[in-house]
Image (cartoon, rainbow, N blue to C red):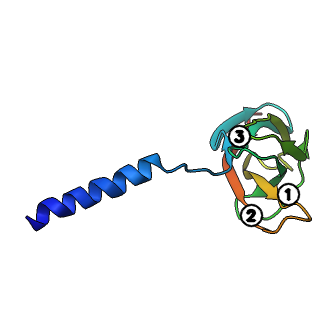
Amino acid sequence: MWRGSANIGLMCIGLLYLTAEVQGQAMTPMRGEITSYADEFAVRVAPHNPYRHRIEVAIRVYDEKFRPIRARVSDSRIGLAGGATRRVLVIVPFEGTRNRRVRICAESIPYPKATTRIRAQICGRFMARRVQ
């Protein structure tokens, strides 16, 4: 009898999990491989705001060890309306190497007068290969 009630309890927890609204900042794609014939490569990412309210997002580029690197971002700081997605172009130089691993991150920017100061970050990993 105990075994049956434990299963019912697990089912209830599972149903609560499925019906709960899960929200979190998102970005697509989360990973990719790029082949380039130039001295730089381009990645188009799309940060998404799953919330109903507007958020500010900064697009930043790091190396594989999360050290900031030089890159050109079409809109490095954007505002996203509730439920909106916006595509951003990121251009990264190879800087003399043949392969480059980068992380492109969408980082939420807290509003100055907001009561909560949470800064969310979601990153995609990209591997670029230069063909000579």
Report x, y in % for residue 45: 75, 38
Q: Of the residues shown, which amino acid type is indicated by label 2?
A: Phe
- Seen from the viewer's position, the closer of residues 99 and 103 is 103
Q: Quadrant of residue 131?
A: top right
Q: Position of residue 76 (x, y in %)?
A: 90, 47
**Disc 3 to disc 2, how far (Cα)?**
19 Å
Characterize the local packing of mark 2: few (<14), some (14-19) or many (20 or more) Cα atoms within 10 angstroms: few
Residue 66 left/right relative to 114 = left
Look at 84% across and 36% down and name the residue there.
89
Crowding near the residue tagged with mark 1, few <14, some 14–19, many ≥20 C-alpha atoms within 10 Å = some
Identify the residue position indicated by label 2 in the image: 66
- Identify the residue at image location x=17%, y=62%: 5
| Residue 90 in which image quadrant | top right
Q: Point out residue 106 in the picture as x, y percentages from the top left corner.
A: 76, 51
**What residue type is disc 3 on?**
Arg
- The x, y position of residue 120, in whole percent, is 72, 60
| Above/below status of 63 relative to 128 | below
Viewer-proximal residue among 47 and 4: 4
How far apart are labels 1 and 2 at the CA level? Answer: 9 Å
The kind of residue on which mark 1 rests is Ile
- In the picture of the structure, the residue carrying the numbered disc 3 is 129
